[in-house]
Image (tube, rainbow, N blue to C red):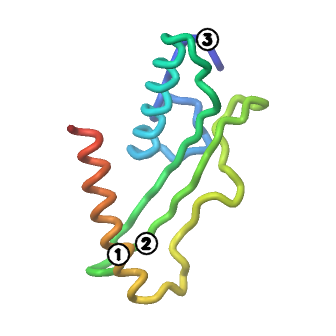
Amino acid sequence: MIRPNIHVLGNASVSAGMPKSGYSANVQAKVCARTISDMLNNRDPGDPSYMNTCYSIVRKDYGISVSVVYSFDETNNQIVKVKGAGGLTPSDASDEALARESRYAHGWFHNITNDMYS
């Protein structure tokens, strides 16, 4: 149910299209903060966009990832996937690409934890 001037994020939000992850909640919090700031300053908050990224390290120098971009569908009042946006590690990725994904995973973890706890 949508209520004016009520902002909810993370596991309590109506975001069925997005996974319940810390990264999703972090992105939702940024959209929420921007929306509240815009509303308090009499600006149009515009159309929000969201993203979720997940990395897994399978073994040393072997990582995989998935990322999805989302938008808000006003017709159904839901967060939905943007068709054709995002991606995942190909099943036939080279050893070099999998090692790069592992490095990206470590960088992603460093950045998201620094963002959330700093």
Q: Secondary structure at mark 1?
A: strand
Residue 61 in the image: state x and y as whole percent: 29, 81
Residue ID at (47%, 26%):
34
Residue ID at (66%, 36%):
72
Identify the residue position indicated by label 1 in the image: 58
Question: Which numbered disc flags the more N-terminal residue, 3 or 1?
Answer: 3
Instruction: Between residue 47 and residue 101, name the one nearer to us.
Output: 47
Marks 3 and 2, how far apart at CA: 40 Å
Marks 2 and 1, how far apart at CA: 7 Å
In the image: residue 53, left or right of residue 111: right
In the image: residue 93, left or right of residue 81: left
Residue ID at (58%, 60%):
86
Residue ID at (39%, 73%):
101
Circle nearer the viewer, 3 or 1: 3
What type is the residue that disc 3 sits on? Pro
Identify the residue position indicated by label 3 in the image: 4
In the image: residue 110, left or right of residue 17: left
Q: Which mark is residue 64?
A: 2
